[in-house]
Amino acid sequence: MNDYQQEQLETLRIVRQGLARMDASERSALKNEIGPYDRFRQAVDDFLQRHFSDVCTRLCYQSRTSACCSKDGIITFFADAVVNALHATPGQLDRMEAVLQQANNGHRCVYLTEDGCIWAVRPVVCAMFLCDRAMETVFEADPRAKMQWQELRRQEKSFKWPDQPVLFDGLEKVFLDMGYRSSLMHLNLSPGLLMVKKKAGLL
């Protein structure tokens, strides 16, 4: 298990411990809080399925030149782990823990198995990744799709860019208030993002 996997494992365990301490009403409130984000993610999935499924299969997966899912290169937020845990079954989370404790001798993301990605809800960085070649292929043929993608990127920012109160910051604070701390709590530990919050008058 390398440093990347250790960091991921520690965060997953923190999230599981924190959620286990909550009663049913607290967990329900948290699920309600992420409702708008869930709808955003469904809109992203629908868009990608409609416009990019065939292109990505042809350009990358069949030719084995995919730029997606690089080893130890996926940036995750603490909120990604919370959202995933709220949607995953205990068995799915157990599988994630088991995978993270195994050596990853391949060249792809540790979470990418023969069955695909084992996240119940993939990190937002993964969901919003499109390579230049795929975007050029789709957007040159369909300018309206490019406008729709730009709107989805704007919506993404509204959940995680802390120049205003955002969901990703709020989810970190829930666990910070419970006494937990993770190196993936970027919105409360990153000097750069703390400066964004300070300039916005949020600190």
Image (cartoon, helix red, strand yellow):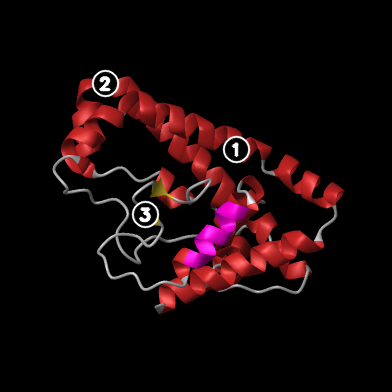
Relative horizontal placement of residue 145, taking residue 12 as reference (left or right): left
The segment highlighted magenta reads 91-98
Pointer 1 or 3: first along the chain: 1
- Residue type, numbered disc 2: Asp
- Residue type, numbered disc 1: Asp
According to the image, label 1 marks what residue?
38
Relative horizontal placement of residue 61, taking residue 162 as reference (left or right): left
Q: Residues within 10 Å of mark 2 (few under 14, many from 20)?
A: few
| Helix, strand or loop for disc 1 | helix
Q: Is residue 132 visible?
A: yes
Please say whether residue 1 is one of the residues in the magenta stretch. no
Relative horizontal placement of residue 108, taking residue 110 as reference (left or right): left
Q: Residues within 10 Å of mark 3 (few under 14, many from 20)?
A: some
The CA distance from mark 3 to mark 2 is: 31 Å
> Mark 1 or mark 3, which is nearer to you?
3
Looking at the image, residue 159 lies above or below residue 70: above
Q: Residues within 10 Å of mark 1 (few under 14, many from 20)?
A: some
| Helix, strand or loop for disc 2 | loop
Q: Quadrant of residue 52?
A: top left
The CA distance from mark 1 to mark 2 is: 26 Å
Give the residue displayed 39% in from the left and 60% down from the top.
Answer: 74
Give the residue displayed 52% in from the left and 59% down from the top.
Answer: 95
Instruction: Residue at the far left: name it.
Output: 63
Relative horizontal placement of residue 183, taking residue 69 as reference (left or right): right
According to the image, label 2 marks what residue?
142
The CA distance from mark 1 to mark 3 is: 22 Å
Give the residue displayed 42% in from the left and 44% down from the top.
Answer: 127
Provide the major secondary structure of the magenta segment.
Answer: helix
According to the image, label 3 marks what residue?
112
